[in-house]
Amino acid sequence: MRSARLSLALETGALELPARGSIAVYRPRVGDDLSALPRDRVVVLTGFKPDHDHFAASHSVTPSAPYAAAIVCLPRSREAARALIAQAAAEVAPGGWIAVDGQKTDGIDTALKDLRGRVDLSESLSKAHGKLASFQAGADLSDWRATPHQVEGFQTLPGIFSADGPDPGSILLAATLPAKLGGKIADLGAGWGFLAAEILKRPGVKKLDLVEAEADALDCARVNVADPRARFHWADATSWRPETLLDAVVMNPPFHTGRAADPALGAAFIRAARRMLAPDGSLWLVANRHLPYDAVLSDCFLEVRDVAGGSGFRVIQAIKPRRDALRAKS
C-alpha cells in the first residue's frame, strides 16, 4: 500500500529524487516495500526492534543527518506522528522534501490537516486507502517534538503503549504476583517499566531482565526503574534468550499488529517464556479473556491455572515447562 503511493508520487513527479544525499525513511514496518528508492541512499530509522532488524539486512540503519529528503511513515498516535514529523523537519536539510504517508485508519487526514496550518503542503495523493503529501524542510516544528509525560511518578512518551498510565491488565497482574517470585526473573514486553518496578518490590529478586522491542519505551524504563538489579534489553521478546534459565517470567504480551488483532503474537511470547524457564519456573501472564491462549499454554506447560480475573482480564500461572515440547520445536 505504501509502495503504491510512493511509486505513483515518483512516476508523476509529485516527488523527485534528490540528485545526491541520503533519504531517511522514518518508522517503516515489516512488509513495506522501499524498492522505489535507491537502496544505497536510504537510511531506515525506527525504534521498533523487529522492524529495525528486518531493514538492517538490506538498508543502512545508522543515523546520518542531515538528509536530502525523508519519508515519514505515519504512526497511529497523533502526538507520536507530530513528533516524528518534527524530527524529520529538524534532520532534513532546508529545501529538501519531507513526504508524510499513511493509511486513513492511521489518521493521515488529521495529520495533513494539522500540517496545513504550519507548512506549505502539497496536494495529497490518494491511493490504496491512504494518502501522501509533502512539504519542504525549513519550517520550525520544534513544538511538536516528543516531550516526556509524568504519570503517577513514571515517565512516558507519546506513542508508546499505555502512555497515559498503567493499563488495567498490568495493574491486575501486579496485584496478583506472589510475594516471592524467585531470584532470576524476566519481564517480557516490559514497556516503560510499571511491572518491573512492582517485581523489584518482591523479596529475593536478584536479577530482573527487562525485554522491550520499542526503544522509546525502554528509554523510559531506564528512567523509571533505577535499580542495580535491573538489566535492559532492546530486543524482540519472542527470540531473546537469557544467560541462564529463569525462575519466573512475567508478562502482559501485546496482541495487536497495527490495528489488527494478532493472538499469534501473544502465543509466541508464551512459547518464548517456556524456553527461558527452569524446570520448576513459573510463567505469570495477564491476558484479555477472549484471547485463545489455552491450547498453547497446555502445549507448553504441564500445569496451568487461572489465579485472578476482573474487568475482562484473566491472570494465569503456568508451571513446569514441557521439555518434550521444546525438543519437538527445536
Image (cartoon, helix red, strand yellow):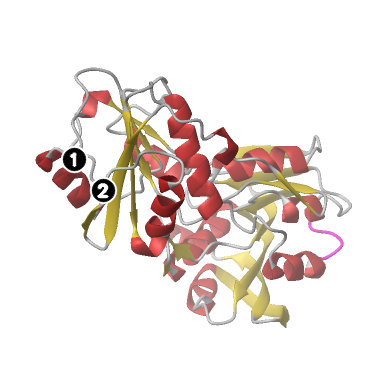
Q: CA distance from mark 2 to mark 1?
A: 9 Å
- Quarter where residue 281 is shown: bottom right
Going by the numbered disc 2, the residue's amino acid type is Glu
Q: Is residue 182 visible?
A: no
The front one of 131 and 54 is 131
Residue 97, given in percent of the width and then of the height, sits at: 31, 31
What residue is rendered at 74% in x and 38% in y? 223
Local packing at callout 2 (Cα closer than 10 Å; few below 14, some 14-19, many 20+) is few
* Residue beneath the point at 38% across and 58% down: 109
Where disc 2 sits, the SS reads loop
Residue 64 location, x and y as percent? 41, 20
**As drawn, 218 above or below 274:** above
Q: Main secondary structure of the magenta part?
A: loop
Res. 79 visible in picture = yes
Of marks 2 and 1, which one's residue comes earlier in the chain? 1
Q: Which residue is mark 2?
A: 123
Task: Assess whether mark 1 and mark 2 are in contact (beta carbons under 8 angstroms).
Answer: yes
Q: Residue at the spot x=53%, y=75% of the render?
A: 298
Q: Nearer the viewer, residue 304 or 124?
A: 124
| Image side of residue 119 versus residue 41, left or right | right
Q: Which residues are magenta?
A: 178-182
In this rendering, which labeled residue sits more in front, label 2 or label 1? 2
Of 28 and 313, which appears nearest the observer?
28
In the rendering, which numbered label is found on residue 14? 1
Quadrant of the image containing the N terminus? bottom left
Image coordinates for residue 50, horizontal then vertical, percent:
42, 45
Residue 172's x, y, as percent? Answer: 75, 71
The residue lying at 32 percent from left, 26 percent from top is 96
**Which image quarter: residue 274?**
bottom right
